[in-house]
Image (spheres, rainbow, N blue to C red):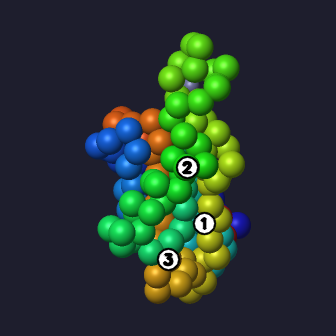
Amino acid sequence: MKVFVKEFTVSTRNREDIVNITRQVEDIVRESGIKNGIVLVYVPHATALLIVDEDEPGLRRDYITKLLQLFPREGDYLHNRIDDNANAHLASAFVGSSRVFPLVNGRIIRGTWQEILLVDMDGPRTRRVVVEVLGE
Ligand code: ZN
């Protein structure tokens, strides 16, 4: 089995922002030369998260709206005594900061309306994305 790891960065522009990272991930998968196995996509950050869904402007806003309903910026958060981003930590932990995809014949299996989206809940900042490809 081969293992190929590479990372890239993306810049977010607002406190809450969504960036489509599908192309960068698929470029790394191609570069790996691995055709069959699995692809792990991971954001090594405590206040960002990954979702897999359609990249449509209205739906992007729906996600931000829903995340802020579930994890409002203001709240009775103890963490906000030392930082002001408890809601971003909670969103990251509950939604998750990694996704795994099947890799078959050189392509990530995903639906037509499934893009890989990085959600920043404590931007704007530069976010790292780690892609690990495992297989043959
Ligand atoms: Zn914090």
Q: Position of residue 121 (x, y in %)?
A: 47, 42
Nearer to us of marks 3 and 2 is 2
Judging by the rendered image, the residue that carries numbered circle 3 is 114
Residue contact at pointers 3 and 2, CB within 8 angstroms: no
Residue 44: x %, y % from top left: 56, 40
Lower position in the chain sequence, tag 3 or tag 2: 2
Dot 2: element: helix
102 left or right, relative to 107: right
Please tell me how crowded label 2 is: few (under 14), some (14-19), or many (20+) other residues with Cα within 10 Å.
Answer: few
Q: Is residue 122 above or below residue 20?
A: above
Mark 3 surroundings: few (<14), some (14-19) or many (≥20) residues within 10 A: some
Q: Nearer the viewer, mark 3 or mark 1?
A: 3
Give the amino acid at mark 2: Gln
Of residues 69 and 45, the one drawn nearer to the viewer in this rendering: 69
Residue of label 2 = 69
Residue 26 visible in the snapshot = no
* Residue where numbered disc 1 is placed: 39
Vertical placement of 44 versus 24: above or below?
A: above
Which quarter of the rendered image does ligand 1 occupy?
top right
Sequence-first disc among 3 and 1: 1
**Residue 38 image point, x, y percent:** 65, 70
Please name whichever residue, 85 or 9, is drawn nearer the observer in this view of the structure: 85
Q: Quadrant of residue 23?
A: bottom left
> Residue drawn 62% across and 61% down?
99
Residue 119 can be seen, yes or no: yes
Crowding at mark 1 (Cα within 10 Å: few <14, some 14-19, many 20+): many
Question: How far is mark 3 from mark 2, CA to CA?
Answer: 23 Å
The amino acid beneath tag 1 is Val
